[in-house]
Image (spheres, rainbow, N blue to C red):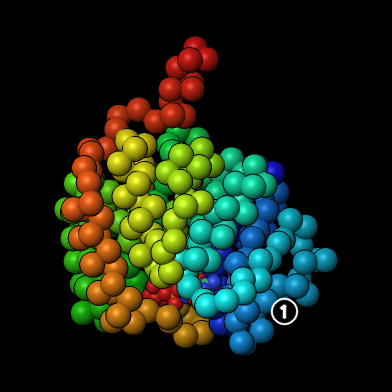
Amino acid sequence: MNTVVFIPTWNESENIELLIKDIHQIVPKTDILVVDDISPDGTGDIVERLIPEIPGLHILHRQGPRGRGWAGIAGFIWALDHNAEYIVEMDADFSHQPQYIPNILNALKDADMVIGSRYVDGGKDMRPGRVRNWISRMAGKYQQKMFQTSVKDCTSGFRGYRGYVLESIGVRDLNTWGPAILSDVLYRVIQQGYVIKEIPIVFPDRQRGQSTLTARILFEGLWNVTKLRFSGFVGNDAKTSQADQADQKND
Ligand SMILES: Nc1nc2c(ncn2[C@@H]2O[C@H](COP(=O)(O)OP(=O)(O)OP(=O)(O)O)[C@@H](O)[C@H]2O)c(=O)[nH]1
Ligand SMILES: [Mg+2]
């Protein structure tokens, strides 16, 4: 297995079939993993029904309490156990548009991690509601400052990783229940000096289904960033990726 796109899902029955079909059409050779927490709306059943139709489609039905973070960790571990070299994570609600997956994979050829970014040239947050967008942006800026990084869209969950990065930051040992997993992973990638690239994405609002974002999740996220910052040294971004180093060795 070379590339896995994984999608955590909680009650995404209105999105999941369309999304899987779009991804499969855009990157037909890529495996797709849905990590579902036994969503009561039957998201998992829809995926099971699609498995015979879509080559490379897989599902993990997680037991126990639900959580975006735990689902993400399960997805990473599954991908690593299946020897994935390139791993893309994305939301199911079409805020992360499948059309960008090839750009992420392309950028990963000479980076360790790639972030689909709303805040670089060509990127855009299309969600209505200025206050919400401002809060998102400020939360991202706070994280950028705390982590002393040049990454502009720290909170984006549309990301690509090289498998060795996830292994070396110890994703198998993480235990974060919620979306704060995104900062836990980013913090560790920065700390280890890996090269992170941002590529522009246009980020539309969720069209169907319910958001899981709450004020509690937002505050927990900010608190987690603060804790990470003061838990140890955060280095500056490294200049050379492992991918580059490998290329140099081969020259
Ligand atoms: N497996 C699993 N997936 C989850 C859980 N909570 C959220 N997700 C998924 O994580 C992704 C992001 O969730 P959203 O509800 O879109 O949260 P958000 O993007 O921060 O909020 P909005 O900007 O309002 O859409 C979606 O694919 C959800 O289905 C969970 O507890 N378990
Ligand atoms: Mg969303």
Instruction: Report whether residue 126 is seen.
Output: yes
Q: Is residue 82 left or right of residue 128?
A: right
Residue positioned 64% across, 60% down in the render = 33
212 relative to 22, above or below = below
Outermost residue to the top: 251
Query: For this view, does 38 lie left or right of residue 196?
Result: right
Label total for image: 1
Pick the residue in front: 69 or 210: 69
Q: What residue is shown with label 1?
A: 45
Amino acid residing under circle 1:
Asp
User: Which image quadrant for residue 156?
Assistant: bottom left
Q: Is residue 212 left or right of residue 49?
A: left
Can you see residue 199? no
Residue 242 location (% of width, % of height): 44, 29
Q: Residue at x 54, y 54 (%)?
A: 76
Instruction: Say if 39 sits above or below 113 in the image.
Output: below
Which percent across, then down, holds residue 61? 66, 71
Q: Quadrant of residue 178?
A: bottom left
Q: Position of residue 27 (x, y in %)?
A: 64, 52
Residue 237, x across and y down, in percent: 27, 37
Which residue reaches farthest right? 52
Q: Is 21 located above or below residue 194 in the figure?
A: below
Q: Is mark 1 within 8 Å of ligand 1?
A: no
Residue at horizontal 57 percent and vertical 53 percent from the top: 77
| Residue in the image at 35% along x and 27% along y | 240
